[in-house]
Image (spheres, rainbow, N blue to C red):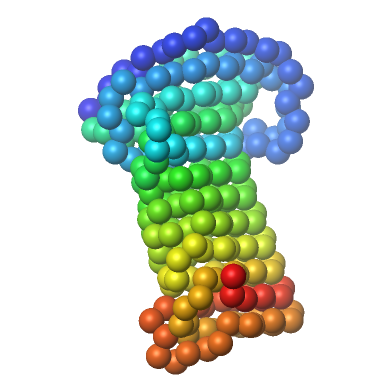
């Protein structure tokens, strides 16, 4: 069931020359900005967007979810909200053809995030389990407290302070840099890019494979280790060290 969101503040319109690559290409458009407070309790977030960036910021002191949108469009102004609540799930949607929407969402810490985007950077901090895919754009993770499964076709992946585990990070074109805060399984794979991993003290089974690039592995391989580090790149160096 879709539920209405309570709108606060005043929407603003600005005509700009929008630059950069989106699903619509580089074009001049109009920017609409607005803010929404979600009155319902949110149990998770699902991404279902086309073009545009996403920033989700968890905070233990936040009790209600707030959504800031920046909608860049050409032609007719898009009507209605691009986000809705479906049985406790906050769904962040797109705005259609010749349009991109960028979200900044403040929410309680530990909320899980799933879904996919077509183009745009994804930044997630202090959230719960993450299962996110983007076709083009970097993925940044900070303080995630659940399992991590992130994939991008074109963009780097960075993660620090990750405590839940296990971690799976995959990109076709981009570097991967991960600094987990607790011992856990890590699987990192890129076709074209380097891999840098910094792990806390622990016992690990280590596998590092590079088709073309150096390997600097300072974490001892323990065949009986309770955690596995599986690092693979087709073209790029691999660095693995203890914190």
Q: Position of residue 157 (x, y in %)?
A: 60, 57
Q: Position of residue 213 (x, y in %)?
A: 74, 79
Identify the residue at horizontal 57%, vertical 17% (top origin). Answer: 33
In front here: 207 or 170?
Answer: 207
Res 59 visible: yes
Considering the image in quadrants, where does the N terminus appear? top left
Q: How many marks?
A: 0
In the rendered view, does 26 fall on the left or right side of 176? Answer: right
Q: Position of residue 160 (x, y in %)?
A: 55, 57
Identify the residue at horizontal 60%, vertical 43% (top origin). Answer: 121
In the rendered view, does 97 fall on the left or right side of 2? Answer: right
The image quadrant of residue 234 is bottom right
Q: Relative to 59, is 219 above or below? A: below
Q: Relative to 183, is 141 above or below? A: above
In front here: 45 or 41?
Answer: 41
Residue lying furthest top: 10
């Amino acid at each position: 069931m879709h539920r209405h969101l309570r709108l606060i503040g005043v929407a603003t319109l600005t005509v700009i020359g929008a630059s950069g690559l989106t699903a619509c290409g580089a074009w001049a458009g109009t920017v609409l900005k607005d803010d929404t407070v979600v009155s319902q309790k949110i149990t998770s977030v699902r991404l279902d967007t086309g073009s545009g960036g996403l920033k989700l910021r968890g905070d233990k002191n936040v009790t209600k979810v707030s959504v800031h949108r920046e909608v860049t469009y050409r032609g007719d102004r898009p009507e209605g909200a691009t986000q809705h609540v479906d049985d406790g799930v906050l769904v962040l949607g797109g705005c259609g053809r010749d349009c991109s929407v960028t979200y900044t969402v403040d929410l309680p810490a530990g909320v899980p995030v799933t879904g996919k985007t077509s183009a745009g950077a994804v930044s997630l901090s202090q959230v719960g389990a993450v299962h996110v895919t983007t076709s083009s754009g970097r993925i940044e993770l900070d303080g995630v407290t659940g399992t991590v499964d992130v994939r991008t076709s074109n963009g780097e992946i960075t993660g620090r302070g990750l405590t839940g585990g296990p971690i799976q990070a995959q990109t076709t074109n981009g570097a991967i840099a991960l600094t987990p805060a607790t011992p856990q399984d890590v699987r990192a794979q890129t076709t074209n890019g380097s891999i840098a991993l910094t792990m806390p003290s622990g016992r690990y089974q280590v596998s590092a494979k590079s088709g073309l690039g150096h390997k600097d592995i300072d974490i001892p391989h323990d065949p009986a280790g309770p955690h596995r580090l599986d690092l693979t790149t087709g073209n790029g160096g691999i660095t693995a060290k203890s914190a």
